[in-house]
Amino acid sequence: GAGVSQTPSNKVTEKGKYVELRCDPISGHTALYWYRQSLGQGPEFLIYFQGTGAADDSGLPNDRFFAVRPEGSVSTLKIQRTERGDSAVYLCASSPDVSRAPYEQYFGPGTRLTVT
Amino acid sequence: DAKTTQPNSMESNEEEPVHLPCNHSTISGTDYIHWYRQLPSQGPEYVIHGLTSNVNNRMASLAIAEDRKSSTLILHRATLRDAAVYYCILKYSGAGSYQLTFGKGTKLSVIP
């Protein structure tokens, strides 16, 4: 079946611009996660959705970062006033009902964001 | 989540078994041991998980020490496609903690 998809695969933007990154989770998965991965590091948690609501946004680095999941499926990560330090691979993952731990997370291929 | 310690890198010859170690001396009784791997230019991929007993699946085996302070991921016959970064992650099984906390992992190189 279809896995997690992310668009675009690559995004180059200028410092100060606004960007949106999209994630399509596996159909039926209620949980959705965003991670960020810098070169040579493991992925770092940003935000977790259970359904439509952000259950945990403690990983968002500052208020320039925002994410939505209005219908409980597709999610968009939004970054305002981008900075060169925002350059990284942004990964999305989804998983089935998290009330039944443990649960695998299924990752998408990521969006490589480059801020020039 | 408790911390894990893994070697930065390992090498294996193709077709030979690989034992990837992970130390987690501060593991609690409710922590599951998860392994994920990340192939070049891809997102992480679930490999296996366990709690106390050894586990086997089609990808790998997980051997867990009796005191649970360490574990070993075993690839029975390494192939070139197994070259990846392998992450050992402890995951609290209770409510309110759902994200994965990745370290730097072990970069496995497979020599043809």
Image: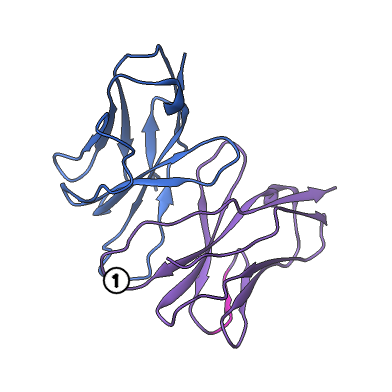
Chain colours: A blue, B purple
Q: Is residue A113 visible?
A: no
Q: Residue at x 30, y 59 (%)?
A: A96
* The residue stretch that appears in magenta: B53-57
Magenta span: predominant SS is: loop
Q: Quadrant of residue A108?
A: top left
Q: Residue at x 58, y 81 (%)?
A: B54
Q: Residue at x 75, y 58 (%)?
A: B78
Relative image position of residue A23 (x, y in whole percent)? 32, 36
Relative image position of residue A106 (x, y in whole percent)? 41, 51
User: Which of A32 and A59 lies nearest the eye of the viewer?
Assistant: A59
Query: Is residue B38 left or right of A99 when viewed as pictured?
Result: right
Relative image position of residue A6 (x, y in whole percent)? 38, 33
Task: Count numbered badges in the picture.
Answer: 1
Q: Is residue A16 above or below residue A89?
A: above
User: Which of A11 and B60 lies nearest the eye of the viewer?
Assistant: A11
Relative image position of residue A52 (x, y in whole percent)? 15, 47
Q: Quadrant of residue A92?
A: top left
Task: Read off the chain for label 1.
Answer: A
Secondary-structure class at tag 1:
loop
Q: Residue at x 45, y 73 (%)?
A: B32
